[in-house]
Amino acid sequence: MSELDARLRDEIDDQVAEALDAYLAERRPRPPRRAWPVVVTVALGVATTWLVPGAAWVAWLAIAVTNVAWLVVVSGKAG
């Protein structure tokens, strides 16, 4: 009985491994995330707002334009 259990476990293990291999082979690889420039520019905006509050609106406008342009370029490459 013990031998049958071991063989059954091995067979189940092999079937699960084959199914997982087939599933992983069919999946498309995920593109790497490219959001780090957005995070960096927002951090720079926060630092600018803290250091030079009077010019903060200029910095945030530049950050918004840069981030939108970056996201448009990245989304265009992913497609």
Image (cartoon, rainbow, N blue to C red):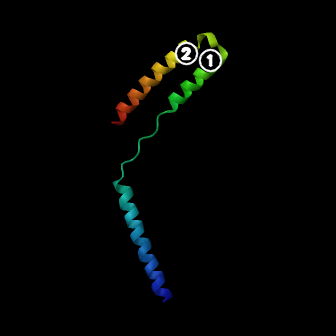
Residue at 62% x, 10% y is 54
Residue at 43% x, 24% y is 68
Pointer 2 or 1: first along the chain: 1
Amino acid type, label 2: Ala
Placement of 58 over or under 39, stated as above or below: above
Dot 2 crowding, Cα within 10 Å, few <14, some 14–19, many 20+: some
Q: How many marks?
A: 2
Residue 58: percent from left, percent from top: 54, 12
Looking at the image, which is closer to me, 56 or 14?
Answer: 56
Task: Name the image quarter holding residue 51.
Answer: top right
Placement of 35 over or under 7, stated as above or below: above
Q: Pointers 2 and 1 in contact (CB under 8 A)? A: yes
Placement of 60 over or under 33, stated as above or below: above
Looking at the image, which is closer to me, 66 or 54?
Answer: 54
Amino acid type, label 1: Thr
Residue at 42% x, 23% y is 69
Residue 13: percent from left, percent from top: 44, 72
Residue that mark 1 sits on: 49
Placement of 18 over or under 71, stated as above or below: below
Residue 56: percent from left, percent from top: 58, 14
Outermost residue, bottom direction?
Answer: 1
Disc on res. 38: none
Residue at 39% x, 71% y is 15
Looking at the image, which is closer to me, 22 or 39?
Answer: 39
Residue that mark 2 sits on: 59
Name the side, left or right, on which 39 lies relative to 14: right
- At numbered mark 2, what does the secondary structure look like: helix, strand or loop? helix
- At numbered mark 1, what does the secondary structure look like: helix, strand or loop? helix
Looking at the image, which is closer to me, 4 or 49?
Answer: 49
